[in-house]
Amino acid sequence: MRRLVTLSLAAGLVLGSCAAASAQEAMAPIRTVAIGKNREFVVNGKPFFPIMGWLQDAGNLPKLKAVGINCIAGYWRPADPAEAKGKTADQYAEQAFEAGLCFLPPFDPAYADEMKKLKSSPALLAWMQNDEPDMPVTRSNAEVVPGKGVIVNGSRPLYMMVDGKPDTSAVLDPMTGASFTIKLKAPVTAVALAVQSTTNPKEAVAKEIAFEAGGKEILKVTLEKKPQLQKFDLTEPATFQEITVKVLSAYPEENVWGAIAEVQAFDKDGRNLLLSEPRKEPRESPESVMAKYKALKAFDPSRPMVMTVTDFFIHDTSLDHWWNRAQQDKLYPQMVKAADVVGFDDYPIYGWNLPAKIGRVSQGMDDLRAYAGKDKPVYQWIECVTGSHENAAPVTGVEIRNEVWQAIIKGATAIGYFTHRFKPTFSEFGPSEENQKAMKEINEQITRLTPVLCAPDAKLQPKIEIEGGLAAQCLAKEAKTGLVIFAQNIDAAGKAGKGTISLESLKPGTKIEVVDEDRALVSEQGKFTDDFGRLAVHIYRVME
């Protein structure tokens, strides 16, 4: 275990002054918040490194505090008014303050009274945009209205029947007796109609179908039980702006619900008149998040606004089915303008079950910085629980520490932990005892080193090489106590090796203190070496 304080650090590197006090002291009210020249948070005139937890029941707040977390971000508003009584955002802020945590609530002008009270809260560190506004969603201009008694499946909406894609389908529950109406923007004239059912062996399959337009039946057919488009000519052309489809009967299967893949109507030239191809859009447009940002600045210019985006901006071709590079380059430069501080969540192990991609943390920081610009503060959410993937390896304390320092070395001036566990049971605060211990050590170290982390980057940056060509990175800070170097091994295969850190200004025989490890090294001309175990992180103070 790392010692909390090393003697040589006690004079300067220890104790980051901040608004959030130690567990034994009451939290000082937050009076002022600013962003400093090094992209750092400055609270009540002193540097502060936010360490956030996400969206917790108030009863969990002491657990966050116990592992060294100093902020709670997000607020969940109960949908049931009866359940929401006594659980307003400003009341939650009071609970956060009592627990010794700063608060980052979502800014929601619809709740004006709560926002006004939050504005004067002693716990208010910053405001938040809605979470992940860049999340891709599929939208369609098609208007397909369910008939009475039809249960709509949100994951397979009715517009999928007119998207022109036979591999997508909309659920009708129940199938027999289901009806829906397709409403068009202008009248069309059709000479033929077509339907394609799905034939899942457990789902009911449409058998008899009737089409109605203008209040009268224009076609009634019996479908074969096959997953192919079945086309039927009309006895005479039909002009309509709305067409209703009724399932009169179904081939019975294990379930009463089933699905229809396509409904089409053709004109005399063979054009599908019902086609409405869906499009992929961000959950919130850049214009809408910018409007909220401007509204916040008019309401409370004294606090920054932060925004968390997904990891879909990362230039990783395996994610191109979310946003491709052209879409990324168009969306994210606009999106990040709607916040003073921008961050992202990326969970290589918890989310993707890809431990070998642990370096995505570093890559993501680089790619986000490219979109956000060199002067905007950035942060990252870190995984600390095991995900829901079958046979997934658990996230370990070593991996948590490595990811945290990847983000910091790449310029993060805040971090957050995603603590939600979904399997085998749900828990908003689900890290194992081992990981809680690791988080506590990491967070206490960050808090003690806050003055260093908030200091300017050194003008002359070192370079690191680990034998065998292992992936590695480092960062030097110009602290008041001297040069401090953060270095780590981020090899995807978890290999170890001897690392060489090169810095032109190093003179032979210079003492290099290894922070919190009770040991020291001696430099050669322009370099020093150290052992880097699997995903190891070392912090060095150059003694002058």
Image (cartoon, helix red, strand yellow):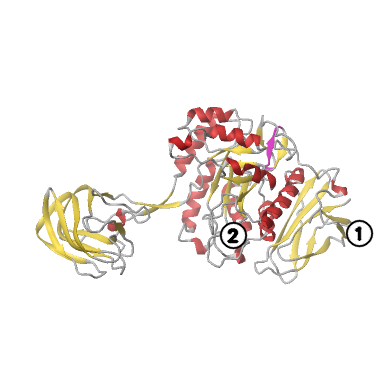
- Say if 487 sits above or below 109 in the image: below
Q: Looking at this view, is 56 or 34 the one in front?
A: 56
Q: Is residue 457 visible?
A: no
Residue at figure coordinates x 69%, y 48% from the top left: 67
Residue at figure coordinates x 44%, y 40% from the top left: 79
Q: Looking at this view, is 261 or 84 the one in front?
A: 84
The residue at which mark 1 appears reads as 509
223 within the magenta span: no
Q: Position of residue 341 (x, y in %)?
A: 59, 42
Q: Is residue 43 visible?
A: yes
Left or right: 273 in relation to 419: left
Q: Say the numbered circle drawn on residue 319.
A: none
1 and 2 marks in contact (CB < 8 Å): no
* Label 2 Cα crowd, 10 Å radius (few <14 / some 14-19 / many 20+): many
- Say if 74 sits above or below 345 in the image: above
The N terminus - image quarter: bottom right
SS category of the residue bearing label 1: loop
SS category of the residue bearing label 2: loop
Q: Which residues are magenta?
A: 38-44
- Disc 1 or 2, which lies upstream in sequence? 2
Residue at figure coordinates x 81%, y 53% from the top left: 516
Q: Looking at this view, is 209 or 540 the one in front?
A: 209
* Front label number (1 vs 2): 2
> How far apart in space, not on screen, are marks 1 and 2 (Cα)?
45 Å
The residue at which mark 2 appears reads as 386
